[in-house]
Structures are given as C-alpha cells and as structure tokens.
Amino acid sequence: MKNAIFAVLIAVSLFACKATQVSKDEKPIDIKSLSGQWDWKKTTGGIAGITITPETARYILHIEFKNSEMLYYKNGEVTQHFHYDITRDKTIYSTDSLYIIKPDTTTNAMPLVITKAVNDTLVLADNVHDGFTTTYIKKNN
C-alpha cells in the first residue's frame, strides 16, 4: 500500500511540473550582443505558476550588461549590481550544457540560465525547480 501511494505521489509530482522551453540555437552567445539595456516584459513560474508583468506589478524593471557588470533597475533606480562570468554548464533545462550567467562570489545573486538569446529577446531562468523565468526585450538606445 505504501508503495502504491508513493508511486501516485511521484506521478502527480512529475505531471505538475511545467517545462521551460529552451532555445535550440547552438550558436555561441555573443557576449557583446548582451551589452546594453533590456526591458522586462514578464516573469513566470514559481510553485503557483504565476505570471507577473509591468502592468500587474505596477513597476518597471530592466537589466543592463556593462563592462562585465550586471545591473538591476527598478523604476530607474539601481537595486542590485555585480560582476559576472558567462560559462557553459549542466542545467535542469537540458541534457546539453547551456550558458549560465554566474555572479561573482561577493554577492548573494543566483546564477541565471540563458534559455534564449535570439535577436532582441533574452530569457533568463533560475536553475532550480519551481524557479522563475524572465523575458527581456533589448532596449533601442
């Protein structure tokens, strides 16, 4: 009986998870193409599978990549900044290694998986189950 209950719990857990779509673009990410400002469009995920947008949150976020530093802005004010490296490593999203933005060790920022970096769209995801995936659009400066 315990085995049957355990099997049902495992099955429910597997079907309850929502997969994040990973870009199959095998071209290396051009670090220079990340340079500049990116406007936040939406964040999805979490245990509840929520979606947050600038309209629902009532604030504006954007990120900026500048001189190997990543800056987070909320309503135009810097809220977090750190130096980073981009490496390829194993993730929860693919059996292949993907690019990961790894913050320096002086910050408590989480590494972010680059699940898509095509044209003017950048999608960053937490490398944890029930994490969040955030979509940004490149700002035309």
Image: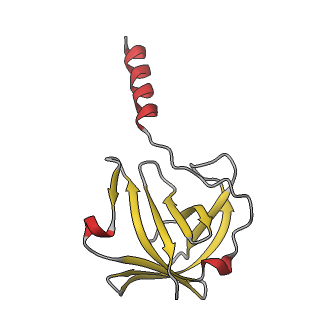
Above or below 36: residue 109: above
Say which residue appears at 45% left-offset and 42% top-offset. Answer: 18
Q: Could you tell me residue 4's position as x and y percent? A: 41, 14
In which quadrant of the rendered view does residue 73 lie?
Answer: bottom left
Residue at 38% over, 15% down: 2
Q: Is residue 68 left or right of residue 16?
A: right
Q: In this view, does 71 lie above or below 5?
A: below
In the image as oriented, which residue stretches furthest toward the top?
1
Residue 14 vertical placement versus 3 (above, below): below
**Residue at (35% x, 48% y) in the render:** 49
Q: Looking at the image, can residue 107 be seen?
A: no
Q: Is residue 101 visible?
A: yes
Residue 64 falls left or right of residue 86: left
Q: Which residue is drawn at 39% across and 26% down?
A: 9
Left or right relative to 67: residue 128: left
Residue 28, image x and y in percent? 74, 66
- Looking at the picture, the colour scheme in use is secondary structure
**Above or below: residue 118 compared with residue 23:** below
Count of number-bearing discs: 0
* Residue 123 image point, x, y percent: 52, 63
- Residue 13 x/y as whole percent: 41, 33
Q: Residue at the right extreme?
A: 27
Quarter of the image where the N terminus is located: top left
